[in-house]
Amino acid sequence: MDRPDDLKRVLAEEIRAAIAETSPDPRAADPSGQSGTSPARGALRRAAQVLTPSVPEEAPLAPLKRLAIRAARFLWRNQSSFNTLAISAATDLAEELDRLRAETGRGLDELGRRAGVQESRLTLMERPAAPDPCGAGSRTEAPAAAAQIPPGVYALFEERFRGSPAQIANGQRFYLQFLKDLPGPVLDAGSGRGEFLRLLREGGIAGSGVESNPVSVAACLDDGLDVERADAIEGLARRPPGSLGAVVAFQVVEHWTPEQTFRFLQGARKALAPGGVLIAETINADSLSAMSAFYLDPTHVRPVPAQTLRFLAEAAGFTDMRIEYRSPVPAAERLTETSENEKRLNALLFGAQDYALIARVGL
């Protein structure tokens, strides 16, 4: 006959075995069969399953085991209550994390886009230097010294100093009012990261771009934009006469010599249909604070005063010209004007940072 101690030991082993049978292996796969379930969710399910041990009907000595579990339940009831509350709190936390993850999905997409652009930059930087088939190392044709800057480095410069695509697009939205009832599509010369092309697409306006930086071109093509990799002046020159409704160039002419700027204006005049529009935005050379931004960009060649650009456009055959001053300095950063002299000083030191020439081709 077995001794009482032996019976207790056997009963304890049977109880442990019964509990083990009902507890899933923590290394096992997700019992729901969902491959995308997070580890935290799986841990919560496993914890919930072992809160209250149970004994399968087919287990040996099942009635005796269930009786023993009920008899010993008072020993762990406080712990069981604590476990229940802890799992409930953890489940609520997991649901909140799921909600936050869904809300930040768009932000993660943007980070993925930036990571892709960065990878493109690094790939280009690792390649041996080779002549640029577009004749330019930055956004457009520039002197040899500026052309030595790798495209990936300049793309990184724009990301850091020019502003986010959303900020640039917000400022360029102003120009859409001049592109109504055009006699043809829009060409964005030096389209960069494609901010204005996206605005055109949103507004249902036909448009394409020409850009020399391969990093920017690749990003635009990935977004479904129509962009040709070429020098802006040469790309414009290949457009058939009278085939375009508008030519825009944002922050581009300061990358050229005066001769190149005039060639661009002549090419735009030839490619535009009667009633077509030219928009050329650049840094305001009459504002000293704006000139600090001009010299920040290592690919800038020379500032273009508004009177100079207007004269060259007139010489190229444009009419109905106007100057729009853009990007005002915030009032908090300007001098307090208590006299006419202080007003003049503000205009000199803290004038508008940019201006745009808007001109048309006569009907």
Image (spheres, helix red, strand yellow):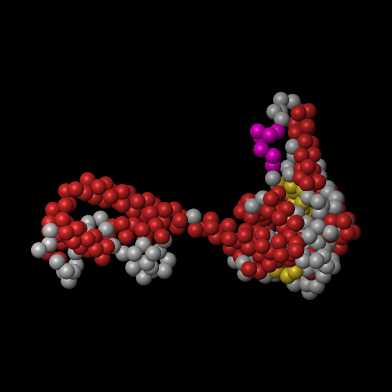
Start and end of the magenta stretch?
328-334
Please say whether residue 229 is visible from this viewpoint: yes
73 or 171, which is in the foreground?
A: 73
Q: Is residue 300 above or below residue 353?
A: below
Q: Residue furthest bottom?
A: 240
Residue at (76% x, 28% y) in the render: 342
Q: Quadrant of the N terminus?
A: bottom left
| Residue 187 visible to an observer of this rendering | no
Q: Nearer the viewer, residue 285 or 138?
A: 138
- Residue at the extreme left: 1
Q: Nearer the viewer, residue 21 or 282?
A: 21
Q: Residue at x 58, y 63 (%)?
A: 202
Find residue 36 and report its horizontal and vertical position in percent: 42, 66
* Residue 117 located within the stretch drawn in magenta: no
Where is residue 130 drawn, in percent x and y? 83, 67
Task: Look at 69% across and 42% down and name the residue there.
Answer: 328
Residue 331 placement, left or right of 232: left
